[in-house]
Amino acid sequence: MNTSVHPSLSIFQNYKNGDLEKLPSETFKLASSYLSKDQINQINLAYCVAKEAHQDQKRREGSPYISHPVEVANILLAFHLDHETICAGLMHDVLEDSNVQKTSLEKLFGKDIANLVDGVSKLNKMEFSDIAERNVQSTQKMALAMSKDIRVIVVKLCDRLHNMRTIEFLPREKQIKKSKETLELYGPIAIRIGMQSLRTELEDLAFECLHPVRAKLLKSAIKTARRGRSRIIYRLKKHIKYSLGKNDVQATVQGREKAISSIYQKIKIKKKPFSEIFDVFAFRVIVESAEDAYRALGIIHNIFKPIEQRFKDYIAIPKTNGYQALHTSLIADNGIPIEIQIQTKSMELVAENGIAAHWAYKSKDSSGPRFFGARKWAEGLEDLNLNSKDSHEFIESLKTDLFNDEVYVFTPKGEIVNLKNGSTPIDLAYELHTDLGNKAIACKVNRKYAPLNVQLDNGQSIEIITGDEVAPDPAWLNFVVSSKARSAIRATLRNQKVSHARKIGRVMLESELKRDGSKLSDYRGSRLQRILNTIGATSLNQLLTDLGLGKKTSNLVAERFFIGKKSVDSKTLQSETMTLADNMLAGVSVIYAKCCLPVSGDPIIAHTDTDRGVVIHHARCRQVNNIRGKQKNLFPAIWGEDKQERFYRAYVRVLVEDRPGILADIASIFATQKINIMSVNSKDIDAVIQEFMFEAEFSNIEMIKKLMIKVRALKSVTSCTRIVNDERSRNEKTS
């Protein structure tokens, strides 16, 4: 092995001298439990490279930087990952934070380890227009590296886990950013590859960081509820275990408690109180074999009453990430609802650790049937990248791909295909092969013809019927749910000739206009031009081409034509004030801009957007002011009466002289005014002044004014302002 690798680190010349610094005791202990002596020696070498590369660096809390990669390696060792992955974990920041080159690592450790380290490394040494662009492209680089070697994401997840464990040492702004990124990206990726235990800890840490007060209250409520549940849990566990043992099924019965982040999401999304979320008693039954699992299910169904349609067999049909278990919901004695998961010991290990459970990389256990779906998903990321026009589209498609439950269907040959919940026959066609999707013209569901946009259910048999010389219909983009299908359709449409796209766009628009009993030829001259101006199109040909290429949505464009027909003069839109009521403006549904968060009673302005419809902005929104006078699709609006009370989000910024109990005093004012606080963030302005940023729900502007008057009256409060644009923008007051 060549020793003259890189002059910057002495370890590259001296590693054969036998005087390498020993591994930390905990790391050595974990490695010795399952790795060979030669493998441990290579890990030792990686540790020495990392330590020398980071020798002058400190973490924010003041400890030597090497403590971080060592902790990452320890987490990987706890999952029993192979020695190459451990080496990559120790050196994952070497390329970013030192002068060491990838080629140097390749010569010393081989291509596999060098590629792993490079896959986890950010693109810090390249020039980008801004930090956001760098982060997007770094994430894309990591995802593509993962498609070639899934160990890349395992290292990254363990890196993120240790960073989240020590997140309190970061500035508050970075804490929020990393916590949101963890919830939006890394948590879903962890569950996609089956690493449930790691995902749970990641999401709990992120939740506690974003919502410290809510997390504290939930933990307290869980602790209190746990005391009242312990006797019931003990009795039910004993009953289940006795019944199984009586029927010669040896089993371990465990009480299972939901993570605080999971409980919070159920409270938020299902709008149920904590008591209803926590009244379900969950158990995990661990048996010796799959046969025992089915026997245990029959026994449990005999002693408790099963709830209809609440049974799932993930043993016969595993989830994409390799998860296997029998799930059932039942009613126990005295009407107590219980949930039971039945697994073997190996299934439990896979459920907690996912693809890391049976790593044995060289024996390719991770490529076995259980993990095929996870690896196939990772490998599919390369195709997703090829079909995406830029890094932003790739990342958005990736995030969309992560947030979906599963449905399984059968091909005519009896093969099982896992799809996302809400999938259509078109999604299935593209999942099987891109050419099959591009040529699809019809389908059969359970041997009967069905529309191509029908949502598929579990257990259905699907046949895709194809034709020659056909192309994807841009209308498919309105109902497909998988990122693979969406990106493939967009890529194919982008490659179509303009003339062909224009023809398709005309057919699409004519079809939509028929709903109103009109046709495209009804719109001519100045009337047509005024409508095109509101859409933001320079010409009808451009509009038709954009429709045919999938850049615009036909139903939204048609709505602008309908509005143009009703109010012939577009100057009316510009000069007359239109009334917003019941989330409708001129018969069109609206959305509220997230940049300025308008509240009922604010001065507002409407912006027509072909992709999103009509967007309502605060009249003082900086984004609107930047385009005022430059675009013709802006028109004034006022608030009308709603049939039912609505609530709008708004930010209130409070500056206080820091003292014990000040946050509780402010929160009590929100409570007495019956205002729901969605989140609270705080940061120190200086040694005396502290900032609280409240995100809350208000029914109108008067409610905000009353709140601010009462908050300003508090002792220690120096100012209370409403933030019209986000907190990074210049603060705007609402008096």
Image (tube, rainbow, N blue to C red):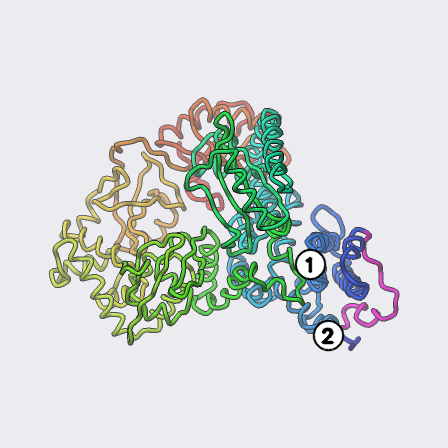
Find residue 66 and report its horizontal and vertical position in percent: 75, 55
List the residue tagged with mark 1: 81
Q: Earlier in the sequence, mark 2 or mark 1?
A: 1
**Relative height, residue 36 to residue 214 (above, below):** below
Q: Is residue 300 visible?
A: yes
Q: Nearer the viewer, residue 141 or 594?
A: 141
Please give the range of residues in magenta. Answer: 6-25
The label on residue 107 is 2
Rounded to the nearest angstrom, the CA distance separating label 2 from label 1 is: 23 Å
Circle 1 packing at 10 Å, graded few (<14), some (14-19), many (20+), is many
- Residue 12 within the magenta-colored segment of the rendering: yes
**Label 1 SS:** loop
Judged by depth in the image, the label closer to the viewer, 2 or 1, is 1
Dominant secondary structure of the magenta stretch?
A: loop
**Mark 1 is on which residue type?**
Leu
Q: Are marks 2 and 1 in contact (CB under 8 Å)?
A: no
Q: Is residue 123 visible?
A: no
Q: Quadrant of residue 92?
A: bottom right
Find residue 87 and report its horizontal and vertical position in percent: 72, 62
Residue at horizontal 50 percent and vertical 29 percent from the top: 336
| Quadrant of the drawing holding the N terminus | bottom right
Q: Nearer the viewer, residue 499 or 426?
A: 426
**Mark 2 is on which residue type?**
Lys
**Label 2 SS:** helix
